[in-house]
Image (spheres, rainbow, N blue to C red):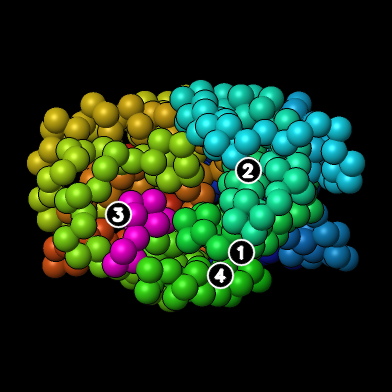
Amino acid sequence: MHRERQGHAVLLRTRRGMSRTVLAGLVGKSPSWVKQVEGGQLQMPKLPMVLRIAEALRVQDLSELMGEQSVPTALFAGPGHARLPQVRAAIDAYPFVADHEAPSAAYMEARLVRTWRARHSSPNHRDVIGSLLPELIRDAQLGVRQSETAAERRGAQALLSQTYSLCQFFIAYQPDASLLWRVVERGMVAALESEDPHTLGVAAWLAAQAHRDSGPGHFEAADAVTLETLRYLEPLLPEAGDDVLAIAGALHFEAGSTAGCCGSLRTGLTSTGGTSTGWGSPDEHGPNQAAAALGPRGALMTALQAEDCLDYTPNARSVSLARRRTARLVADWGHPELAGDAALLASELATNALRHGCLRGRLFRVRVVLNARLCVSRSAIPAASGCRILACPPTWSSAGAGFCSSVPWPTGGGPSCGPSARRCGPSGL
C-alpha cells in the first residue's frame, strides 16, 4: 500500500482496538503479513483481500481504507439460505381471495408452539423453521382476514405478530435487509393491533435488536422503542403473568445493551418484588429461550456474584474453549451442579455462532451471568468499537434480576481471542 493507505489501515485497526494478531486471524493471514502490508513491504492486496480487511475493520466505505474516491461496500451479511425464496414469497404475497378456511386460533397457537420448540431443539434451526414458515405465514394472514368479531381479530393479530417474530429469527443476517425490515414493521403493527402486552413486548424486543444491529445511526431508534414499550408495560407488571415479566426483563437488558453501544453507562433493573421465586419453567416456545436459563426453580440462588465475558474468533477450537471456560466459571461461582448444563449451553451457542449468520470470521462473544435467580449464557456480536461488561453490585439482585450494560473500551484497548479475554469475575472488575 502507499504511505497514505498504510496510515489509514493502521489508524482503522487501532481505533478498533485490534492487534495485528487478531486482524490476521480474521483475514486468514499471519501477523507478519499484516505488518508487511501496513509497512509497505508488500504490494497492495487484491480486491477480495481488501474487502476482507474492510469487513474485519468494520469499514463502511473503502475510501476510509484506501484513501481514494468513495466506493461504498455493504458489509458481508452471510449467504442466503436455500429456503429464503419460499419464505420471501410467502411474506410478499397478499391473500386477497381465500381459497380455503383459516385454521382455528387454537390450532395456530399449537403450531407456533411446535415450531418454536423445533427451532430450539435443532442444531440447524434455519432448515427446520424455513420449511414450516411459508405455510404458517399464509395461514396467519388468512386468520386475520377471516376474523368476524373484534376479539377474534385481536387474537388473530397476536398470532400473526408471533409468526413474524419467528420469521425474524430466520431472516436475520441474510442478504435481504428490506425483507427483514418489512417483517419487523409488520410484526410491530400486528402486535399493536392485538393489544396483547406479551406480543407487543416481543415485537418491540426484536425491533430494538434490528435497529441496533443496523449501526450507530439506529441506536436512538432502538432506545426509543425499548423505553416506550417499558413505559407501556410498567403499570401492568404487578398483575402480569410470567411471560410479560420475562419480556419486560428482556427489554431492560436491551436498554442497557443499547446504552452501552452508544457509549453511555446505563443499568436496567427489573424489580419483580417477590414474584421471582414463583416463576414457572422458562417459555419453551418463545424467543426468550434464545437466552437459556439454568438453575433450580422455586428457590433463589445466592446473590449476584459476577458476570464474565469472553471473546473468540469462531473456529473449532473456540467451541471447546467456550465450553470448558463456562463450566469452570460456574463451578468457581459456587454452583458446580450447574457446570455441566452451562457447558453444554455455551457449546451450543458457540457452535451456532460458527455455523450460522454473519458471525463467520468475526469475533463473537459468550457472556455468562450469575444472578439471584438463574445462570444465563448467551452469545452476541461485540459493539462496533468493542465493549466491556461491568459486574452488577450484589445489592441489585435482592428481589429480581440485574441486567448489565456495556461501555466502549478506552482507546488502545479491545477484545482479544481465547480464554485470556476474561473481563470480570467473582472478584469484580
Percent x, y of residue 159: 60, 46
Q: In the depicted view, which residue is nearer to us: 97 or 151? A: 151
Q: Mark 3 — residue?
A: 423
Q: Amino acid at mark 4?
A: Val
Of label 2 and label 3, which has the lower sequence position? 2
Query: From mark 1 to mark 2, how far is it between C-alphas?
Result: 14 Å
From where the camera sits, is residue 414 visible? no
Q: Residue at x 31, y 64 (%)?
A: 239
2 or 4: mark nearer the eye: 2
Q: Quadrant of the C terminus?
A: bottom left
Q: Residue at x 16, y 60 (%)?
A: 274
Query: From mark 2 to mark 4, how far is it between C-alphas?
Result: 20 Å
Q: Amino acid at mark 2?
A: Thr
Q: Secondary structure at mark 3?
A: loop
Q: Is residue 243 magenta?
A: yes
* Residues in magenta, as a range: 237-247
Specify few, some or many for label 4: CA neighbours under 10 Å numbering under 14, 14-19, or 20 or more.
many
Q: Amino acid at mark 3?
A: Arg
Query: From mark 3 to mark 4, how far is it between C-alphas?
Result: 30 Å
2 or 3: mark nearer the eye: 2
- 178 to 140, vertically: above or below: below
Q: Which mark is residue 163?
A: 2
State left or right for residue 429 relative to residue 102: left
Q: Which mark is residue 192?
A: 1
Q: Which mark is residue 394?
A: none
Q: Mark 4 — residue?
A: 225
Of label 2 and label 4, which has the lower sequence position? 2
